[in-house]
Amino acid sequence: EATGNAAYDGMYVQVNALTSFGLRLGANYTWSANFSDSEEFSNDGAASGDGGLSGSSAAIPQDFLNRRNEWARSVFDRPHRMSFNYTYEIPWFRSALPMLNNVLGGWQVSGFTELQSGMPFTIRTGVDTVGNLIGLSSNTSSSGRPDYNPGGILLQDPATGNLRTFTIPRDGTGIVTAPHVIDPGTGAITILRNSMPGGGTLGRNTFRGPGYASFNMSLMKKIDLPGDRQLQFRGDFINVFNHDNFPNPDGNMSSTNFGKQIWRPLTDTRQVQLGVKLAF
């Protein structure tokens, strides 16, 4: 049946401030927990090239007779989310002569910042290890999970120190393991089909990918014109610090890209938009 269970708990805090010197501030923080035993992918964004939701978690359980074993953090779970907005009317030359104020004054700086936890993801064997005939035509649709090895190896991305990328050996020494064979000639590792009835012991959405940070700013110059008209020059700087945000890495153990970044970044290059507006 097409059904599922979910639970959401959260705390939300909002703060707004208006100062006497032209600075407006707003901040929002959400602390939450989102649990479920299945995912809803009807509006998945995988077609955009960033992996979407289906690239991070399976839409079906690994064992249809044990839905309780699927209860875990949802792929939508973001324990921490913060956003800031600000606007500052720069007071330069505000009390000067009108001509001087129009030339050197009337500047406004504003911005919007988003910070949030990364998206959970599930490591899957990539083949039909469960024996439920799911994933025979496409390894990416397999929902079988490996076993958890608490003393195994997990190396996080050496540059960021998080799971932007990771290294897990597949020879049985990694933090996740699955029945496999090793080709004596090439050393290639092949995970065996129909080798884990009921699925592995690794939980669903056990790992969490890199967090998200976005910084956007605007700079605007206002010039008062006769007749209650105003000319505005504006520059918008999207991703002003040129910060890269990455989706989850490849969690398919049977893929040659296991643990690597194969999707398009969520944000990468800085974008600048310039505009002029006449208000009347």
Image (cartoon, helix red, strand yellow):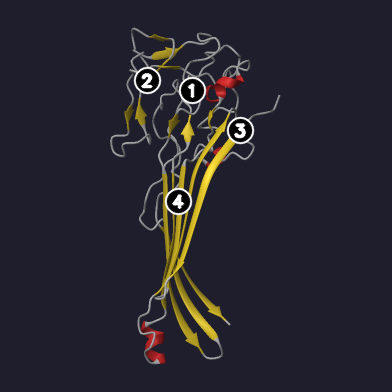
Crowding at label 3, few (<14), some or many (≥20) Cα neighbours within 10 Å? Answer: some
Using the numbered discs, state the Cα–Cα distance from disc 1 to disc 2 in whole angstroms. 12 Å
The residue wearing badge 2 is 175
Say if 155 sits above or below 33 in the image: above
Using the numbered discs, state the Cα–Cα distance from disc 2 to disc 4 in whole angstroms. 32 Å
Question: Residue 4 vs residue 107: left or right?
Answer: right
Say if 130 sits above or below 73 in the image: above
Question: Residue 206 vs residue 36: left or right?
Answer: left
* Disc 3 to disc 4: CB gap under 8 Å: no
Q: Earlier in the sequence, mark 3 or mark 4?
A: 3
The residue wearing badge 3 is 6
Q: Amino acid at mark 4?
A: Met
Q: How many marks?
A: 4
The part of the image, by quadrant, that contains residue 178 is top left
Q: Amino acid at mark 1?
A: Gly
Identity of the residue drawn at 55% across and 20% down: 69
* x and y percentages locating residue 279 in the rendered image: 56, 79
* Disc 1 to disc 2: CB gap under 8 Å: no
